[in-house]
């Protein structure tokens, strides 16, 4: 069984209950079922659901399980396990993952907000990250050495990949960024040019998130989404749902 094939047999996972929101991207999948068991939550899904695996991979403390020929095993183990999902159908994700309540606030005096963006300029800075098409990352991973892959951590966002590391590859269609907690394209600076802490607060970035600024606007990327690169991992991340 190849490293990629083994993920096709994964049909369940156990995660800490507070990370149930990681399933938000697949809340419309009726085949994904949830069993809440106090401090932990079990999730089951049909074999081959790569999109569910991608949602759960960054979750701290996640444990994956396979179910072959009536035997449950933890992913990576050849021994059967008694640690198995609860009986029953469980609930669909949409039934347990709902938006939080909100209350309307009274209108405030109109103010003129500052527009956060980027402009050309600033001191020359070394690149610490890059954003590239997933297709370019896959092509590079097929020919890169093991050491080159191990020097980079990556996270996927749609059809783009964000890479972090001191030795970044040269990829087609890539944009390089500088910074640590706030990432800005090389050759640009934030406008207004505020301290990173102020920029992060203005954009609502949490301590466990990176803030990425580019010409399209601002977005946050969870630090937990970044993982060391492997060829199998890149191929799995690029596989269609």
Image (tube, rainbow, N blue to C red):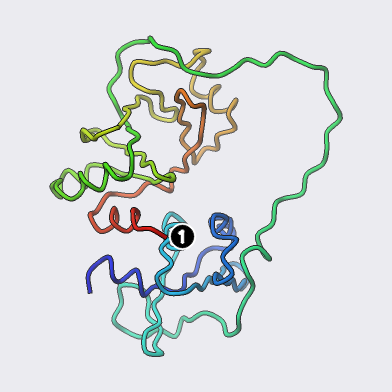
**Residue that sits furthest to the right in the current view:** 106
Q: Residue at x 51, y 29 (%)?
A: 218
- Residue 220 in percent (x, y) is at 50, 36
Residue at mark 1:
56
Q: Quadrant of residue 120?
A: top left
Q: Quadrant of the C terminus?
A: bottom left
Q: Quadrant of the N terminus?
A: bottom left
Number of other residues with Cα within 10 Å of mark 1, as a class: few under 14, some 14 to 19, many 20 or more? many
Q: Is residue 152 left or right of residue 36?
A: left
- Residue 74 in percent (x, y) is at 37, 76
Mark 1 element type: helix
Q: Quadrant of residue 235?
A: bottom left
- Residue 50 in percent (x, y) is at 41, 63
Q: Nearer the viewer, residue 57 or 51?
A: 51
Q: Residue at x 39, y 29 (%)?
A: 180
Q: Residue at x 50, y 14 (%)?
A: 191
Q: Residue at x 31, y 44 (%)?
A: 153
Quick check: 142 above or below 2? above
Q: Quadrant of residue 28?
A: bottom right
- Residue 52 in percent (x, y) is at 47, 62
């Amino acid at each position: 069984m190849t490293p990629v094939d083994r993920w096709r047999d994964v049909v369940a996972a156990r995660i800490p209950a507070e990370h149930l929101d990681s399933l938000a991207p697949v809340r419309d999948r009726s085949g994904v079922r949830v069993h809440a068991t106090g401090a932990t939550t079990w999730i089951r899904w049909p074999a081959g659901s790569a999109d569910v695996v991608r949602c759960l991979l960054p979750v701290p403390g996640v444990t994956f399980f396979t179910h072959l020929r009536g035997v449950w095993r933890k992913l990576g183990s050849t021994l059967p396990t008694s640690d198995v999902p609860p009986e029953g159908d469980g609930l669909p994700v949409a039934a347990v993952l709902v938006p939080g309540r909100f209350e309307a606030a009274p209108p405030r005096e109109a103010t003129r907000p500052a527009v956060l963006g980027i402009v050309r300029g600033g001191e020359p800075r070394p690149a610490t990250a890059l954003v590239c098409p997933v297709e370019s990352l896959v092509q590079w991973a097929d020919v890169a050495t093991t050491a080159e892959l191990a020097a980079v951590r990556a996270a996927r966002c749609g059809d783009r990949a964000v890479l972090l590391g001191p030795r970044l590859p040269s990829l087609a269609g890539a944009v390089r960024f500088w910074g640590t907690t706030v990432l800005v394209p090389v050759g640009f600076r934030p406008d207004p040019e505020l301290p990173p802490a102020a920029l992060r607060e203005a954009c609502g970035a949490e301590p466990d998130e990176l803030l990425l600024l580019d010409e399209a606007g601002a977005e946050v990327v969870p630090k937990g989404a970044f993982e060391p690169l492997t060829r199998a991992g890149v191929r799995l991340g690029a596989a269609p749902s």
